Image (cartoon, grey):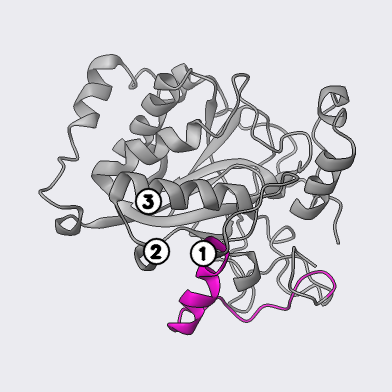
Amino acid sequence: MMITSCLLSSLLLATVPQFASAWSGQPKQSSPLRNTALSEDVATRRSFLAGLATSSTLATVATSFPSPASADDEELIDCYFGCGCFWHVQHEFVEAERKILGRSDDQITSRAGYAGGKAGALDGKVCYHNAGNVADYGKLGHAEVVSMRIPASKFYDFAVEYCKLFDKDGFRPDQFGDRGTEYRNLVGIPGGKSSALAELLVKASVDTGDKLDFAVGKGDDRDVPKVSFIMDTSEYPSFVGEQYHQFHDGFAFGENYPNSYNSLASAFAKKGEDFGKCPNGSLGIGLGGL
């Protein structure tokens, strides 16, 4: 099992609580660094959109996706959010689907997966670390994400939930446990930085404390604290993760979710959902990344 696994993070937080306050170095890379320097596009959120994110522009963007009489009447968009280990993140977005969209268990679309790598899939697969070294997501340049299908008019609300995952200093929940390219912050939206959705993402960040900076994702990007890479989903789609990673308990010690939540993975599988044909984890067990 690789040192940057969600499981190790949970053990680290449980056994060495002072680790987070003691750690002050640069993030360790969990896979070879593809970009040796930060892109020129990495800047503050103020310069990210070259002045487009003014209050008047954002107000216009916010009304450019009118809410239909029912969410069912609106065309849905595929997007994803990444912020460290996907176990906790998936749970938060499942709750967001319930709260914001009123979705029932069988309507939930949030799935743990991988995205952001230049290589895409290998032989149709993107897999978690495994003993056979088959299509390892880290080696393919991907990060852990949670994908979902939501109405465009509700993207701002989901972006707010994403920004709320970061603390007051802009650090993600497992910033001092899981570190490296596989855990970098990223958001995938149709059209990438050119989309009106990108401006809504910036607005959500500003409205929740202005804790994040943004960068144009170019694939295989670095893990940079307080920076989230904006990806174009047409160029960098998400790939669904293995069944054993879906609706998993969180990475923090004691972050256990109800069985009704954990059982959603098997419920969707029984209905025919395909979670891929990847090997079961680092040791072939298919539990907690092992």
Q: Residues within 10 Å of mark 3 (few under 14, many from 20)?
A: many
Whole-percent x and y of residue 21?
A: 82, 23
- Residue at label 1? 260
Mark pair 3, 2: CA separation? 10 Å
Residue 190 at least partly seen? no
Q: Residue 250 in magenta? A: no
- Residue at label 3? 97
At label 3, the amino acid type is: Glu
Which mark, residue 105?
2
Give the quadrant of the C terminus. Answer: bottom right
Please tell me whether mark 1 sits on a helix, a strand or a loop: helix
Where, by quadrant of the figure, is residue 53 drawn?
Answer: top left
Residue drawn at the location 46% of the way across and 24% of the way down: 48
* Residues shaded magenta: 260-283
At label 1, the amino acid type is: Ser
Please tell me whether mark 2 sits on a helix, a strand or a loop: helix
Mark pair 2, 1: CA separation? 9 Å
Whole-percent x and y of residue 59?
A: 22, 22
